[in-house]
Image (cartoon, grey):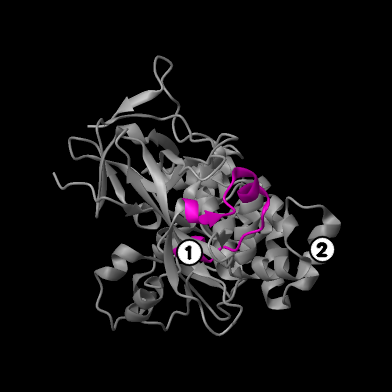
Amino acid sequence: MVATPTRVYAARVTGLPVFGPDGEQIGKVRDLVTALRIGPRPPRVLGLVIELAIRQRIFVPMLRVTSIEPGAVVLATGTVSLRKFTLRPNETLVIGEILDTRVHVAATGAVAVVVDAGIEQARTRDWVITKLAVRERTGRLSRRGPVEVFGWDEIEGLTLAEVSSRGQGAEQLLSLFEGMRAVEVANTLRELPAKRRYEVVDALDDERLADVLQELSEDEQAQVLGRLGDERAADVLEAMNPDDAADLLGELAQTERERLLRLMAPEESAPVRRLLTYSSDTAGGLMTPEPVVLTPDATVAEALARARNPELTPALASMVFVCRPPTATPTGRYLGCAHLQRLLREPPSDLVAGVLDVELARLGPEATLAEVTRYFAAYDLVCAPVVDPDSHLLGAVSVDDLLDAALPDDWRQQEAWPTPDWSDEVTHG
């Protein structure tokens, strides 16, 4: 086994896969938990916050860590507690709360910002934060100061009270978010103390915040939206998928909803207003108004090119819809749909109109959640057309929208699976 380095830095540990002694991956490191002390003594690192493949975050004590290697963390046992991680009052997240904290260099009094924390294992086997990498604030907007490494006792301003009350930036935390999916960032925000959560929300750009909001529960979305000014809230709503924006606005009071809709650009608010006319538990309320729509003279190659759009979910990319102009919903006459698997088997130069499925039943916008569920089960689909009585395509329901509606409202906040009654631990491997 590769020996654990003398010192490792928290930002480099974050994201590392975690393995049991048998080599089976348990999850990924998302943060480290520490207990800040009064005085200059370096604080202990209590354990790791690990995100399982099922998106649940758990706590693993540092005593169970055998080694921290350049590409992985190895545990002494494959048995881990599945109890959902909850931060205790006397605990602090290294990545979530200490990074970006404004501190002072004791020798010079210079103001600096923490960019990383070095941890080492003491003779007692305890892991402690011994070093802090900081960047001094030079006051010059055009240049960033160099990063310097100091001992924990050479830095002032990191007591529990100071970290909990002082305002922070979010530059280092956002840099760690760059390699994370929106759902992983949402999980991180959920675990942060409220103060820190909203500091990060303020620092996220509108597009990224829109993606993250879509992974939060409706109550959490409303809380975040309420913290934003009206102008920014409208900008974020414009960046969201129209169906997600409609779901969020549907949770607000009528006056607040109308105020935000008026602040949105007309071309962005129009599809959201249409969705709001349907009940949230109908096909019209579940659908997205922006599926892949082509005219009958489009080629198979064009259809495949549209399906390759990385912004499409796999469900929406599985089917293209062919309609008479206009192609914006509500479209001209709906002619049929083409399944991705069929398109892959056809010559690229052929017209998409020649491979249409014209017999697939259509969902009406008033179809209930139960009817939509039976439809998906009967036809083995992950995407389905929503068509009005005059044969205009209004949008498409995808299986992820269906599951979101079928699950309890707080499913994102619940534990990923129930802990067995006889034990709160599960052995991996």
Q: Does residue 389 appear in this view?
A: no
Write down the quadrant of residue 331 in the picture: bottom right
Disc number for residue 134: 1
* Rendered location of residue 421, percent (x, y): 43, 16
370 up-or-down from 235: above or below:
above
Quarter of the image for the C terminus: give it. top left
Q: Is residue 156 magenta?
A: yes
First reached walking from the N terminus: tag 1 or tag 2: 1
Amino acid of disc 2: Glu
Lateral position of residue 378 relative to residue 101, left or right: left
182 up-or-down from 191: above or below:
below
Amino acid of disc 1: Val
246 up-or-down from 6: above or below:
below
Lateral position of residue 134 relative to residue 269, left or right: left
Labels 1 & 2 near each other (Cβ < 8 A): no
Q: Does residue 170 appear in this view?
A: yes
Dot 1 falls on a residue whose secondary structure is strand
Disc number for residue 258: 2
Q: Nearer the viewer, residue 293 or 197?
A: 197
Q: Is residue 112 magenta?
A: no
Residues at marks 1 and 2, CA–CA distance in whole angstroms: 46 Å
Q: Nearer the viewer, mark 1 or mark 2?
A: 1
Write down the quadrant of residue 296 in the picture: bottom left
* Rendered location of residue 210, percent (x, y): 59, 63
Query: Farthest front residue?
Result: 107
* Rendered location of residue 410, percent (x, y): 60, 39
Lateral position of residue 86 relative to residue 377, left or right: right
- Over which residues does the magenta segment extend? 153-175
* Rendered location of residue 116, percent (x, y): 44, 59
Residue positioned 42% across, 58% down in the render: 315
Query: Farthest left residue?
Result: 1
